[in-house]
Amino acid sequence: MSQQVTEHRVALKLNEEYCSSCSICCSLCPFEAIKKDAETGNTFLEIEKCQVCGICYSACPAKAIDTIYYDSGSLIKYLERAKQEYDSDTLVIMCKGSAPDFVGIERLFGVSKFVPLSVPCVGRISEELFLKAIAMGIEEIYVLACDQNYCRFERGSPVTGRRILALNLLLEQLGYGREVITLKRHSLKVKADRDLCIGCGNCAFYCPYQAVKLDSPGVANFNLDSCRGCGLCVAICPAMALELENWERERISTLISRLSSEMEQPKILVFRCQWAVFPPLDGEFSPNICAIDLPCAARVDAFHILEAFQKGVDGVLIAACPEEDCKLERGSGRAQHSVAVLRERLNQIGFEDRLHFCSVAPRYPEEFDRELRQFSQRIEAICSKRERK
Amino acid sequence: MIVTTQKPLDEILDSISPYSNILIAGCDGCTQPPRGIREAKTLSQLLDLGGRLRDKNFVFKVATVVKQCDSFLAASALKPQVDGVEAVLSLACGAGVQTVAELFPDLPVLPAQNTHFIGVEDREGGILEERCAACGDCLLARMGGICPVTRCAKGLLNGACGGARNGKCEMDPARDCAWELIFQRLDKQDKLDLLKEFRPPRNYQLRAWRLTP
């Protein structure tokens, strides 16, 4: 497949006709994907380096950047619809990194009824969108960003902080009241149950951030300041003594049970790294396909994959970032390894080939679509063969 | 640590096939990674799926023991779990399996692991190697901390044999010559005179089969 040279549809484009070469995008891009040509002075995009955080899109004063994910038009359309649906004047904008779902929003902000907007990185929300939301009748906006040193896109959280500061000043001057927009930062990290810890040291060995040490006598001791919440340790802990906030095993298991009972045949469950696949704002797949977001592919867990098969799921697809794109360290590679080990074990019991690992990047949206299509076809073929028997 | 590897799952499925209610007993000790509660659960899931493919419905209970080779710890963790159980599938080494078998003389206790040796893991490379033969007469103090009983293919106590080529063993070129390693280590520590000392043949009685602590 990789030899197939086709014109890729890309997630981000720079429209040179509109570009005023102001360089704001170049200075904000965390990945040096947008640069200024020293000779011509033109701005250019190296799509291979782009991680589609959308910070440049939200900051471009000339609107010279186009994106296919969460662009202003579709965000506004979503807000108009969601405002009716949720019947609220309160908007909560969440970064997926710090809030995979709406759990804990009430506790953090003290709001129970709100219009939710979940995006990969709040840094992609422009000033314009905040103001449009207010013009739409939204009275309060709460923004949940990741801690600055936890932001998967490095600058998303700091940029948002500065934007909200300026917007609040502006809104106050315009007579909308003080602090219309409230920013909170939160990061989802590991939780260790010291009573269950058997002191094997695997978390300490595998943690890419040296966030855990073995205390004497042999109990894992986490330094949460260093934890980046990838979930690698949670997925390997032999004693199941670790959990990741908001991705607790029980929560994922409940989700698997619910999804597998709701899905149509042949049931396909996708575990996707939330930085590898950006879902559209509205409904997603056909009724036989469901997805569970992971904080990083490293959190992919043989336990949950097997659980899905036990509950009658026909195919499990793991979507991770290419190793060089992994927002965390070694997450993608580790996931690939653990899926390979599990495949070998499934092979030993004579289980059909119903587990697939793929690496995809949101910069090429067709990559995931193609993987999913091919996997669906394979599972359909396996299922119809089984029925014939 | 005791080094074990997982038995192939089809072999385990064969061994448990006469039974329906099975207790999978993990062991948190020794092996790396420990075959604790996670492995017990994962194995129960895999065997459940494997059973379904063979028209067999197993019912699994899972538990884990801090150290399965300790009869007291094994009894306190597993005794409350065996009601209605027809067989125990143990994730421990041979010593753990036998401890549990002695604990429940009426129950078949089946191993889920093959036990290989006392060894170490090169965790970066993922390689496991034997380091101790439990000979009962430790020579490491005089050998620069390198055990000739396990690491010399011929188990020589007065090496080297002279057959090594480029530091590799003549019996298996993948293997370092233990005696060259011993020489280099002692040289580094300026203790080469230790090699002049003659080591008499091993006294195999020291290995012992029963001891009183």
Image (cartoon, coloured by chain):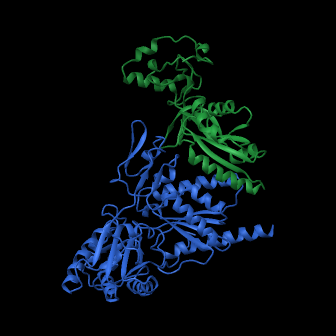
Chain colours: A blue, B green
As displayed, is residue A37 above or below residue A194? below
Looking at the rendered image, the quarter that the C terminus of chain A falls into is bottom right
Q: Please provide percent x and percent y for residue A113.
A: 41, 77
In the image, what residue occupies the spot 58% across and 65% down? A256
Q: Nearer the viewer, residue B143 or B106?
A: B106
Looking at the rendered image, the quarter that the N terminus of chain A falls into is bottom right
Q: Is residue A263 left or right of residue A18?
A: right
In the image, what residue occupies the spot 37% across and 49% down? A211
Q: Please provide percent x and percent y for residue A106.
A: 39, 70
Judge whether residue B19 can be spotted in this image.
yes
Q: Please provide percent x and percent y for residue A28.
A: 28, 72
Q: Nearer the viewer, residue B147 or B29?
A: B29
As displayed, is residue A49 above or below residue A90? above
Q: Is residue A150 left or right of residue B88?
A: left
Q: Is residue A379 left or right of residue A299?
A: right
Q: Please provide percent x and percent y for residue A322.
A: 47, 64
Q: Quadrant of residue A215?
A: top left
Judge whether residue A317 can be spotted in this image.
no
Q: Quadrant of residue A275?
A: bottom left
In the image, what residue occupies the spot 52% across and 28% down? B177
